[in-house]
């Protein structure tokens, strides 16, 4: 590890300790603190704690200033373990910002409720080579080789649900799971697969960068974007202040607001639609691999 990287790791550890350590000398203040767990997700490539801290400390500071409660940032590197502790009531998280599948699971299993969600919804695009005989999703048959992300990731869930609604049941070995968009595209280019599943914005960029080489044959159902959720133990008045503050961040031109908005790098925040996370959870229940 380079000296600069080591310094950043040490700084991150120090910041997380200062932000998250309890203060036994002031128990009355402790009740006004809200611990914010953050998991940016696999797509962002931010798995190191210092990267999450850099991105979300301005957001935590903004919420603290607007809500009147100190928001403590605590990055999450192992989401499955975090979810287990949350479901068992052993977690200190009062707020959480993360991917929609995680949010849906926390809402169902761990007593969380939605506060706000990104305006931009998430959907997958089905891409083929231009010379492919496939014209629409209905042309996909059970043996069609489909490259898609890990079966635990949202895009794979959306792709599987969409194909199912089209009456298409892929053979088990027809699904070719890849760890990154680059691998999905490479498999298509090398004729190892017939269809590539990727985020809609990634597909749009691919088609623009290489016109005439690839084309889209359909899109998946969509899902909510990243969400801010709160535990039910957070008073409703506090949840309302959080909601108002996060929505206000969309147009806040103050120095604090501009810094938080630029750092968090999401689409504008909006109110959640009724039952949208329950619907996503039903899709996840159907397609997520079952642990043995």
Image (cartoon, rainbow, N blue to C red):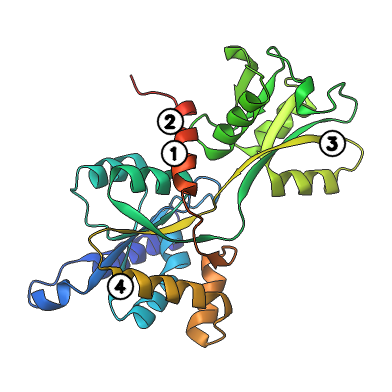
Instruction: Quadrant for residue 172, please give it.
Output: top right
**Picture disc at residue 238:** 4
Above or below: residue 118 compared with residue 153:
below
Q: Is residue 71 visible?
A: no
Q: Which residue corresponds to the image point at 49% horizontal and 53% vertical from the top-left?
A: 46
Counting residues from the N terminus, which is met first, the one under dot 1 or under dot 3?
3
Q: Tag 2's secondary structure?
A: helix
Which marked residue is nearer to the observer: mark 3 or mark 2? Answer: 2
Q: Tag 4's secondary structure?
A: helix
Q: Tell me the CA gap for discs 1 and 2.
A: 6 Å
Instruction: Quadrant for residue 8, please give it.
Output: bottom left
Counting residues from the N terminus, which is met first, the one under dot 2 or under dot 4?
4
| Left-right relation of 85 to 26 | right
| Left-right relation of 152 to 111 | right
Residue labelled with disc 1: 281
Q: Which residue corresponds to the image point at 54% horizontal and 60% vertical from the top-left?
A: 118
Counting residues from the N terminus, which is met first, the one under dot 3 or under dot 4?
3
Q: Tell me the CA gap for discs 1 and 3.
A: 31 Å
Q: Which residue corresponds to the image point at 59% horizontal and 35% vertical from the top-left?
A: 158
Mark 1 residue crowding within 10 angstroms, few (<14) / some (14–19) / many (20+): many
Residue 195 coordinates in the image, percent (x, y) = 74, 26
Residue labelled with disc 2: 285
Q: Tell me the CA gap for discs 1 and 4.
A: 26 Å
Q: Tag 1's secondary structure?
A: helix
Counting residues from the N terminus, which is met first, the one under dot 1 or under dot 4?
4
Mark 3 residue crowding within 10 angstroms, few (<14) / some (14–19) / many (20+): many
Which marked residue is nearer to the observer: mark 1 or mark 3? Answer: 1
Above or below: residue 149 compared with residue 34:
above
Q: Tag 3's secondary structure?
A: strand
**Picture disc at residue 215:** 3
């Amino acid at each position: 590890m380079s000296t600069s990287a080591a310094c950043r790791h040490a700084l991150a550890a120090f910041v997380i300790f200062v932000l998250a350590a309890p203060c036994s000398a002031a128990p009355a203040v402790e009740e006004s603190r809200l611990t914010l767990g953050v998991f940016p997700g696999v797509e962002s490539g931010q798995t190191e704690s210092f990267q999450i801290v850099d991105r979300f400390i301005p957001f935590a500071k903004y919420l603290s200033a607007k809500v009147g409660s100190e928001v403590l940032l605590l990055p999450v590197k192992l989401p499955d373990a975090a979810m287990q502790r949350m479901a068992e009531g052993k977690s200190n998280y009062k707020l959480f910002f993360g991917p929609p599948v995680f949010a849906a699971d926390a809402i169902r299993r761990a007593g969380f409720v939605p506060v706000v969600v990104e305006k931009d919804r998430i959907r997958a695009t089905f891409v083929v080579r231009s010379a492919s005989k496939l014209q629409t999703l209905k042309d996909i048959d059970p043996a069609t080789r489909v490259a898609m992300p890990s079966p635990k990731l949202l895009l794979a869930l959306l792709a599987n649900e969409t194909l199912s609604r089209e009456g298409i049941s892929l053979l088990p070995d027809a699904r070719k799971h890849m760890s990154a968009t680059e691998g999905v595209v490479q498999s298509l280019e090398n004729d190892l697969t017939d269809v590539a599943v990727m985020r809609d914005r990634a597909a749009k960029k691919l088609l623009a960068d290489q016109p005439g080489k690839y084309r889209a044959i359909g899109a998946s159902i969509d899902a909510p974007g990243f969400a801010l959720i709160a535990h039910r133990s957070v008073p409703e008045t506090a949840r309302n202040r959080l909601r108002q503050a996060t929505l206000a961040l969309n147009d806040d031109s103050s120095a604090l607001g501009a810094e938080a908005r630029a750092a968090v790098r999401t689409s504008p925040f909006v109110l959640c639609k009724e039952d949208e996370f329950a619907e996503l959870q039903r899709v996840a229940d159907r397609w997520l691999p079952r642990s043995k």
